[in-house]
């Protein structure tokens, strides 16, 4: 295990074929979203400007990744009715799509019979897993890298099973 975990940018910049992300939490407490989330809760307005300070770094990274021919896909397993945070996330997903990501949603009840890893992850080119660790209240507690073939296969199989059942963003209705 390497002593330092590459950033998302480093991982995506090195991807040659695919970058898939599985999210399985109903609440995330990511610090750089705090102000935007509070504003959305108070006004119902979400920053969806791909050039904004909040979105620009991500949009730029995804666009240059997709421009190299790398497929970037994200699947979200969510409880229904969804949490306020998932409503907020759903409201901003239009920016992910515009950057070139493909995003799908799977109601948690439809994932009951799937074998899933215990943590969210990114899987790069089917071989490098970046685990995302969170505290109970959704605050990021860091990441971890694995290049073990069995771990990569577990994540690829889990993502594939979720993706096959999940609903594309444009047709997923929030309840």
Image (cartoon, rainbow, N blue to C red):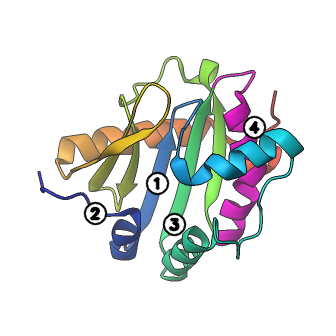
| Mark 3 to mark 2 CA distance (whole Å) | 20 Å
Q: Which mark is first along the chain, 4 or 1?
A: 1
Residue 48, given in percent of the width and then of the height, sits at 77, 62
| Mark 4 to mark 3 CA distance (whole Å) | 25 Å
**Nearest the camera: 94 or 58?**
58
Local crowd size for mark 3, using a 10 Å CA cut-off: few (<14), some (14–19), many (≥20): some
| Mark 1 to mark 2 CA distance (whole Å) | 16 Å
Which residue is at a point 49% across and 33% down the rendered structure image? 138
**Nearest the camera: 153 or 124?**
124
Which residue is at a point 61% across and 51% down the rendered structure image? 33
Task: Label the magenta part by its dominant secondary structure.
Answer: helix
**Nearest the camera: 171 or 84?**
84
The answer to whether residue 171 is seen in the rendering is yes
Residue 87 is marked as: 4
The answer to whether residue 168 is seen in the rendering is no
Give left or right: position of 153 versus 13.
Answer: left
User: In the rendered image, which quarter contains the C terminus?
Assistant: top right
Residue 6 is marked as: 2
Of helix, strand and loop, which one carries label 1? strand
Which residue is at a point 66% across and 39% down the rendered structure image? 105
Determine which residue is flagged by label 3.
Answer: 71
| Mark 1 to mark 3 CA distance (whole Å) | 8 Å
Q: Is residue 72 above or below residue 103?
A: below
Residue 128, given in percent of the width and then of the height, sits at 27, 56
Q: Which mark is first along the chain, 3 or 4?
A: 3
Give left or right: position of 7 versus 51.
Answer: left
Residue 20 is marked as: 1
Q: Circles 1 and 3: CB distance less than 8 Å? A: yes
Question: Does the magenta run of residues contain 84?
Answer: yes
**Nearest the camera: 51 or 158?**
51
Q: Circles 1 and 2: CB distance less than 8 Å? A: no
Which region is colored magenta? 79-99
């Amino acid at each position: 295990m390497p002593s330092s975990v590459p950033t998302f940018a480093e991982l995506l910049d090195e991807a040659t074929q695919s970058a898939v992300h599985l999210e399985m939490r109903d609440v995330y407490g990511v610090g750089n979203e705090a102000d935007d989330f509070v504003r959305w809760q108070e006004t119902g307005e979400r920053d969806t400007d791909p050039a904004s300070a909040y979105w620009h770094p991500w949009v730029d990274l995804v666009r240059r990744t997709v421009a190299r021919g790398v497929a970037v896909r994200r699947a979200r397993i969510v409880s229904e009715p969804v949490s306020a945070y998932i409503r907020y996330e759903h409201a901003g997903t239009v920016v992910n799509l515009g950057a070139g990501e493909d995003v799908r949603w799977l109601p948690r009840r439809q994932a009951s019979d799937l074998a899933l890893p215990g943590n969210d992850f990114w899987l790069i080119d089917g071989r490098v897993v970046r685990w995302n660790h969170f505290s109970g209240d959704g605050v990021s507690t860091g990441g971890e890298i694995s290049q073990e073939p069995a771990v990569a296969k577990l994540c690829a199989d889990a993502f594939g099973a979720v993706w096959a059942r999940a609903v594309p963003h444009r047709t997923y209705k929030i309840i």
